[in-house]
């Protein structure tokens, strides 16, 4: 079993829909959970960061961590065509190494 | 402008010819890291550095070397490149660690023939 699993997609949704992106993981020691967004031909950029369990909201984005299920989610409300990108989850149990998921390609259809 | 720069952006080389990909940041960041990104395999950490003269292996260090002699620079060295090192490489830096906001460079696309 891989440490971090993420469905590569692609995921296509109409503009304005709520998008749900997910990752599962196997290492219960993970404490830090992140979501990065990567536009085509660009480097990733940090979108959301959560420590341990719980929810975090930032504008149209909500990150959820369920450590009991080893499951994290990113929700995008009122999705826009500009949200079309690859979304990578990332996790760490210490502050030096980091494990990324394979990324989910998201297409928001106008 | 705060940024991470990488050079070259594109490189085609042949098996066994040593090469260096440079990475430089102007944000006075302590932490720097190298990643490779491959279709179907995602983004994987090669090496990282918590501070000057402190480097350590990530998940896929085989065939790579790094050095951190100055805070701003973190070059990636391929002593004897092989075709399986054909990939898109990203350098990143952050204020203090992997879980801090990492700022990524624009990427270096390497092809080894």
Image (tube, rainbow, N blue to C red):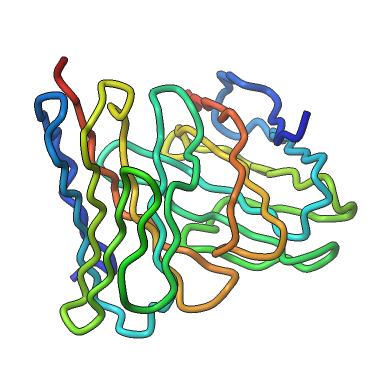
Question: Compared to B84, does A35 lie above or below?
Answer: below
Q: Nearer the viewer, residue A8 or B46?
A: A8
Left or right, A51 with reference to B101: left
Residue closest to the eye, A89 or B78: A89
Q: Position of residue A73 (x, y in %)?
A: 23, 59
Residue at image point 40% right, 51% down: A58
- Quarter placement of the N terminus of chain A: bottom left
In which quarter of the view is residue B7 placed? top right
Total tally of numbered discs in the picture: 0
- The one nearer the camera, A66 or A96, is A66
In percent of the image, x 24 and y 70: which residue is there? A25
Could you tell me which residue is drawn at 50 percent across and 37 percent down? B82
- Residue under the image location 33 percent in, 23 percent down: A82
Residue A24 image position (x, y, % from top left): 20, 66
| Left or right: A31 in relation to B13 | left
Quadrant hosting residue A101:
bottom left
- Residue farthest to the right, as pictured: B70
Image quarter in which the C terminus of chain A is found: top left
At which x and y percent is residue B51? Answer: 79, 65
In the picture provided, is B112 more to the left or to the right than B103?
Answer: left
């Amino acid at each position: 079993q891989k440490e971090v699993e993420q469905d590569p997609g692609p995921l296509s949704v109409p503009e304005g829909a709520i998008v749900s992106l997910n990752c599962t993981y196997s290492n219960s020691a993970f404490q830090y959970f992140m979501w990065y967004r990567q536009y085509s031909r660009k480097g990733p950029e940090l979108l959301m960061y959560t420590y341990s369990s719980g929810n975090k909201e930032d504008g149209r984005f909500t990150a959820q961590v369920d450590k009991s299920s080893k499951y994290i989610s990113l929700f995008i409300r009122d999705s826009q065509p500009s949200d079309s990108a690859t979304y990578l989850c990332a996790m760490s149990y210490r502050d030096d190494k980091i494990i990324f998921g394979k990324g989910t390609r998201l297409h928001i259809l106008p | 402008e705060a940024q991470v720069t990488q050079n070259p952006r594109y490189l085609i080389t042949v098996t066994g010819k040593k090469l260096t990909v440079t990475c430089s940041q102007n944000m006075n960041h302590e932490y720097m890291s190298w990643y490779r990104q491959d279709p179907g395999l995602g983004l994987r950490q090669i090496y990282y550095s918590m501070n000057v003269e402190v480097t350590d292996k990530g998940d896929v260090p085989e065939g790579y070397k790094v050095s951190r002699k100055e805070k701003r620079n973190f070059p990636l060295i391929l002593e004897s490149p092989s075709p399986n090192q054909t990939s898109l490489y990203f350098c990143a830096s952050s204020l203090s660690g992997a879980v801090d906001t990492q700022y990524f460079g624009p990427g270096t696309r390497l092809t080894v023939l």
